[in-house]
Image (cartoon, coloured by chain):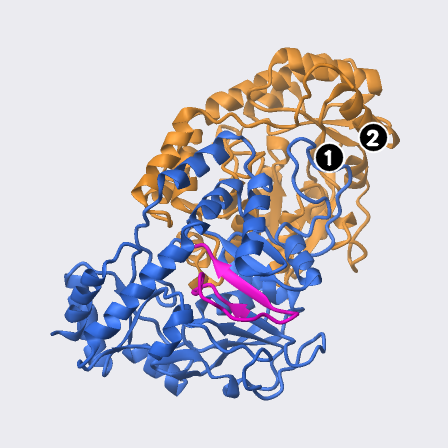
Amino acid sequence: MSGRLPEVERTLSAEDRVAVREALASGWWTMGPRIAAFEEALVRWSGAPHALAVSSGTAALALALLARGVGRGDRVAVAAWGALGPTAAARLVGAEPVPVDVRAADDPRMDLDAVPGDVVAVVVTHALGWVADVPGQGAAPPGEVSGRRGRGAVAGVVEDATQAVGADLGPAGPATLRAFSLSAASQLPVGEGGVVAAWEEEAAARVRLLRSHAMTSGTWDRHRGHSDAYDVVDVGFNFRLDEARAALATSRLGRLAEAVAARRAALAAAREALDGTAWRVAFAAGDDAAASPAILPLLAPDRAARDAAAGRLDDAGAVATSWAAAADLPRAREAADRLLLVALPEDLSPGAVGRTVRVVAHT
Amino acid sequence: MSAAPGVPLFDLAVPEEDLEAVDAVLASGRLAQGEQVAALEAAWAEHLGVRHAVAVSSCTAALHLAYAAAGVGPGDEVVVPAITFAATAAAVRYLGATPVFADVAGERDLGMDPEDAAVRITDRTKAVCVVHFAGYPGAVAELRALCDERGVALLEDAAHAPSATLDGRRLGTFGLAGAFSFFSNKVLSVGEGGMLTTDDDAVADAARAGRTPEGGANLRMDEPRAALLRSRMRRMEDEIARRRVLTRRYRELLAEEPRVVVPYRDEDVERSSCYVMPVLLRDPERRPEVRRRLREEHGVQTSVLYPAVHELSAYAGRPGNASLPRAEHAARAEVTLPLFATLDEATVERVVAALRSVL
């Protein structure tokens, strides 16, 4: 389906399965010690002072936008290709997603120079796992990006890392907000799930509140029932993650670095295998070291070649997809025409990668 | 503090068959919505006697999709009861619309009062959402007639009421769509989960599309949770039967207690899912002390279902919010007593004795 990463079967370890079993057997299924443990592990993993487990990457993006102060009627810049999550998240909070062209077909990260000046927030997607420049954090500043809180150039930015779990996202600023996905297609898959990593305490508190109906009673402590007198202070959502999925995510987090390394090796094998053909892997090879590839992004010479390759892969039983452009913008359209996104299972050997790309490049 | 073990508000039994059902899915490595979800939806649709069941991430999500399918949008209104969990109203706000609160029938029936609902309907109303409080049927016949007459949709928040019935027909099937909850403290639980049901093909299609990011949000359920639900659903009817036995025992023991009102009637129990055991204190001012002493002196946990939504900060003081005396009274007087399938009658007796001693 356009915009969504292909889901492939994932190998779960014995430890993963025990973690889920123990979580379920405990009879404490929501907002308990396993969520707390997962969030502590995320803090260590992400470097953020605060991490919140939520129900999906889209929920993480929506909560991050709300923490940024985005509200009904606000305009939010999103990439015109590969930003299904940010587009949905903007609409979910009542905002208007404003598509911004990408840099090139072979570099589908947002062109920050093309961000209009009247947006309240920018959602920067670390496209397909490759790290994007973020306004106000070491990147050449775009035009004015106005933020409702008036905090200068970094105001109004949310990093969409839903495709980039495990990437080396680089230094954070004081107001950084990063959204991750734990979907079945993620590098850290649990089924459905997400994470918000926040550097500001106030933003973290806002996410924590709004993921659970803006109730002020704190966690749903099974040993106390509901607190004596809760209030609901805002319009919140049910964007909670449950204990079993938190336990699974914690278990898998321990192997994430290894999984990312395996994908980078497959990526290198793909670059080599396509050398001398009319195809290549998108992005510059120099960007691979920091990336956490979600898939193999293969750039065809043209749309006809891409479509033919997709057909051959389908015949061969390989999983691949392509995404439409969200707006009629030239580079987004070219990315839509020429990019073939080939699924990257964890156990894909460099040899298997070689075979797959030969099917693609028809060599 | 009592030396006896405490009595929690709810408890979860998790037999080996549930754990194995989930483990089998994990072993397959297929985590995203697939055949388990499809099988769950088919089983739920059959159980309710409806054409479509759409599994989602929560009852809040199901309400969101139900309101959207009813055409609720910016500037519209939805009539909801004031005694409900805030989600019934919040989901209206997600669509840019306004929840309009209706009073409840009274101390003996905490469901929406159809006469008051009739007063709340305006030319901006798109839907009325009835809540089947504690698993007892709301006034669906009267509300259905009202909605038909006024040209608005009837929706059902059946979070408390999987498997409850009215005139032999399952709750959740009387309107355009029904919304169910599988939150961890519900009659059928999975942690986080929900279901939308409908006989309307267009509503079902919209809900299936709406639960995906392409459709505007990720509200999907995944395979492990669907497998867990399928396993637990097999025991649901037996567990509800058990809840009814326990509820009857509570009612028997409290029948002559003048200091509380026990809502609903003995004959209502048979068609209820008996999600919770609500009582109303005749002296609401004593509630904080009653609850505290039950907890501290007897180890008995209680809850309040619910603070009146129109009095919560996010909803209070809005223009058009009426005073709703019966809901406001219920919100101050209600105490929810422990009730779950593995509770035993001796413990019910202990809870009632404890309650009597602190009233």
Q: Quadrant of the C terminus of chain B?
A: top right
> Residue at the location (82% across, 24% down)?
B293
Note whether residue A313 is visible.
Answer: yes
Amino acid under label 1?
Val
Foreground residue among A355 and B246 = A355
Q: Is residue B56 above or below residue A274?
A: above
Q: Secondary structure at mark 1?
A: loop
Q: Earlier in the sequence, mark 2 or mark 1?
A: 2
Q: Disc number at residue B287?
A: 2
Quadrant of the rendered structure where residue B355 is?
top right
Supply the letter of whichever chain is orange.
Answer: B
Q: Position of residue B302 (x, y in %)?
A: 72, 29
Q: Position of residue B19 (x, y in %)?
A: 41, 31
> Residue at the location (15% across, 62% down)?
A315
Q: Main secondary structure of the magenta part?
A: loop
Amino acid under label 2?
Arg
Image: magenta residue range = A159-183
Supply the letter of whichever chain is blue.
Answer: A
Q: Position of residue B1 (x, y in %)?
A: 78, 19
Mark 2–mark 1 Cα distance, whole angstroms, equals 10 Å
Foreground residue among B247 and B28 = B28
Q: Residue furthest left?
A: A363
Q: Position of residue B164 (x, y in %)?
A: 53, 30
What residue is pinned by disc 1? B304
